[in-house]
Image: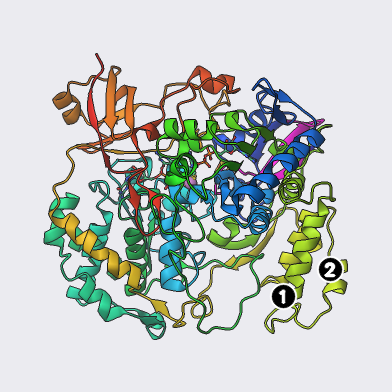
Amino acid sequence: MPTALRICPLCEATCGLTLTLDGTRVTGARGDRDDVFSQGFICPKGASFGELDADPDRLRAPLVRRADGTLAEAGWEEAFDLIARRLPPLVERHGADAVGVVLGNPNVHTMAGALYPPVLLGALRTRSLFTASTLDQMPKHVSSGLMFGDPFAIPVPDLDRTAHLLVIGANPLESNGSLCTAPDFPGKLKALRKRGGTLTVVDPRRTRTARLADRHVAVRPGTDALLLAALVHVLYEEGLTDLGALAAHVQGVEEVEAAVRDFTPETVAGACDVDAGTIRALARELAAAPAAAVYGRVGGSTVAYGTLTNWLVDVLNVLTGNLDRPGGALFPLSATVPAPRPAGPGKGFALGRWTSRVSGHPEAKGELPMAALAEEIETPGEGRIRALVAIAANPVLSAPDGDRLDRALGALDFMVSVDPYLNETSRHADVILPPPPPAQSAHFDFAFNGFAVRNQVRYTPAPVPLEPGRMDECEIHARLILAATGMHGAAPHTVDDMVIARTLARVVTEPHSPAHGQDPQEYAVRLTGRTGAERRLDLMLRLGPYGLTLDRLRAHPHGIDLGPLEPRVPQVLKTRSGRVELLPEPVAADLPRLREALSAPGDSLVLVGRRHLRSNNSWMHNVPTLNSGTNTCTLQVHPEDADRLGLTDGGTARVKAEGGELRVPVEVTDAVRPGVVSIPHGWGHDRPGTRMAVAAGRPGVNVNQLLDGSRLDPLSGTAVLNGFPVRVAPAS
Ligand SMILES: Nc1nc2c(c(=O)[nH]1)N[C@H]1C(S)=C(S)[C@@H](COP(=O)(O)OP(=O)(O)OC[C@H]3O[C@@H](n4cnc5c(=O)[nH]c(N)nc54)[C@H](O)[C@@H]3O)O[C@H]1N2
Ligand SMILES: Nc1nc2c(c(=O)[nH]1)N[C@H]1C(S)=C(S)[C@@H](COP(=O)(O)OP(=O)(O)OC[C@H]3O[C@@H](n4cnc5c(=O)[nH]c(N)nc54)[C@H](O)[C@@H]3O)O[C@H]1N2
Ligand code: SF4
Ligand SMILES: [Mo]
């Protein structure tokens, strides 16, 4: 059987896969043992690549809304014609902000999603941008932006070399890791323990990751900022801070000491439900380890103090001398970022340069909170969102209050979805543009190489050719940009040519650029690649820190290893001071809110999410082998709570919160701590008008319907999806 290589796009681990092919059909997938990074690792999702690729419910042609309101298959020309006819006039009449753009998670898993949305946004000039980041990692971008001057300067734990890993609200044994790209994360944690290192997991659930740990701290949800502030307090109090080589590049060390003075282990113990002795031990262990890393993810991010928690994670890394040191938390250097400029002060990071129209939420990284999308569509007035372009996004299930968003999307004047499925969100579109299945797409990880635990670079061209009638997703995006901005009909490579010309015009004037002083036209002609996207990749590689080219990459189909992570301070810093700013002003201004949490009475029952290995957000429930076996969309509840509430295993519970009410099967388990219940997200496939037969057959419930969109981390606009109060009773 012929085989072909394809980097797996199904989670952040980016494993190299070897696909077996029967003609253009993928008949199997195994880990590519020669992959320089993943070395043969594969998980059940990757193994189902062929099935996912061949899902009969994937749309094969665009869908366009007819006069009678139904969606019907149409040709590509007709689809883009309609966009060109409807979208630009709306902008002309109502202004740029009347067009909203929604970007979902899979954009970080496709080449198209990395290369084109920035161009679309630049051309539309809209401030109505909403992405999955404000349901996820925006607090990390904000804390990095404020501390390091660059929202993408995100330190990752040096998993292969660390001696102590403190994990806050992450479950890599199910998620396979996030903002820490590491194929075989589970194996790396086992290796850490094998070489004598220690693993501590802070999580209100005893997860598979927690079970692997030396120490599991079942914190009360939403209180990690208090816990970590107390850890910082102990470091100062016991003289355990030691910044090492970093000291010369950090300012604000004394200010942080003053800022955490009130957060003693004894004062936070009650709120966190972690005893003071344990808190002190956590701080001492962290300080004593020869090299250690603190790593926080979703459970420390989509919470009321998300930005503070993410800030404290790196404060701990800095104060223990572990930031930017091997075995600690280091900044990766991806092959497609511009070659580093010399160290020195930068422009810094600004928050709240504008605010949302209805609730006045500050922008973060140019984005408004996804939780505010519905009100921006529904609330009358100038600047109301009337049209939407949704790319790889399913906010009806992934964002708070899907019912409201569902109604809002239905009230739009015009909507475009770039999505392979007719699902809960795309069913509202007037035009759905379906990308081809992954086996027909080339792959490069523009995003995840920047968060990888080892510097490396890999490119896999499309394993099989496009089926007749299919359009590459890069071309779909390019044509969408042209149709949306009055250039309908121009050749799609026009978009890439424009980007290349603009980039070169800029970099040839930059002294540190490898293209400095060259002639932009001559440089552009030298770029190789059969498509606009490939030529842009070639350009980025050439302008990058390793001086690579696309040809060189293609000559190494299993990738090029670029070595372990290395220290990058001070060059990586872009703050105005040119130093790590340990107590940024917006963070200091948010601390009084945290102080209030010390005396606030805790909620008696709160809900957290969870992830399952065989699932991924909302869109993999249509693959039979992944969505089979026991139902995973259950309410997990601790036996003590079950007794108190009158719930029985296998029974049905009624769960109520501000945004609505659900009926969900009960699973009694002591894997959740008392006072905490858990429901996974991404379910609720029971709306009419979708075309995902397998998912609809096992719909589950939409946990986000419990939320009304009002709970946000104020600094980042990130929705509180973990640790919100619920009421639970048996369903009669
Ligand atoms: N309660 C709760 N809610 C959560 C979370 C949680 O932990 N708890 N997690 C949040 C997180 S971390 C995230 S990232 C968000 C995700 O939120 P979304 O990004 O809105 O959700 P996904 O399910 O990832 O949906 C992505 C969409 O992309 C489509 N798609 C799949 N592959 C492709 C492709 O190759 N190209 C294109 N164009 N489209 C594609 C799918 O069909 C689907 O419609 O959900 C968030 N929601
Ligand atoms: N199988 C699978 N893999 C995935 C995904 C998926 O849906 N399924 N989604 C992908 C995406 S988009 C992302 S962003 C990543 C996420 O990757 P992770 O962050 O590793 O994934 P989660 O399983 O959400 O882990 C969050 C953990 O935080 C815990 N938690 C909840 N509230 C709190 C709290 O207040 N404090 C603390 N300390 N812990 C808390 C939860 O119990 C949970 O175990 O996973 C990616 N990989
Ligand atoms: S771990 Fe992630 S990248 Fe690797 S095979 Fe599984 S889904 Fe794919
Ligand atoms: Mo995510």
User: Can residue 176 be seen from the camera position used here?
Assistant: no
Q: Amino acid at mark 1?
A: Arg
The response on whether ligand 1 sits within 8 Å of label 1 is no
Answer above or below: position of 679 versus 136.
above
Compute the Cα span from label 2 to label 1.
13 Å
Q: Which numbered dot is residue 506?
A: 1
Based on the displayed image, in which of its 4 quarters is residue 551 positioned?
bottom right
Q: Position of residue 296 (x, y in %)?
A: 38, 56
Q: In which quadrant of this rendering is ligand 3 seen?
A: top right
Q: Position of residue 161 (x, y in %)?
A: 46, 64
Q: Give the crowd class for mark 1: few <14, some 14-19, many >=20 residues within 10 Å.
A: few
Q: Amino acid at mark 2?
A: Ala
Q: Is residue 486 magenta?
A: no
Judging from the image, the colouring scheme is rainbow
Q: Position of residue 377 (x, y in %)?
A: 49, 41
Based on the displayed image, in which of its 4 quarters is residue 631 positioned?
top left
Q: In the picture, which quadrant includes the N terminus?
A: top right
Q: Residue at x 40, y 86 (%)?
A: 248
Q: Nearer the viewer, residue 564 or 333?
A: 333
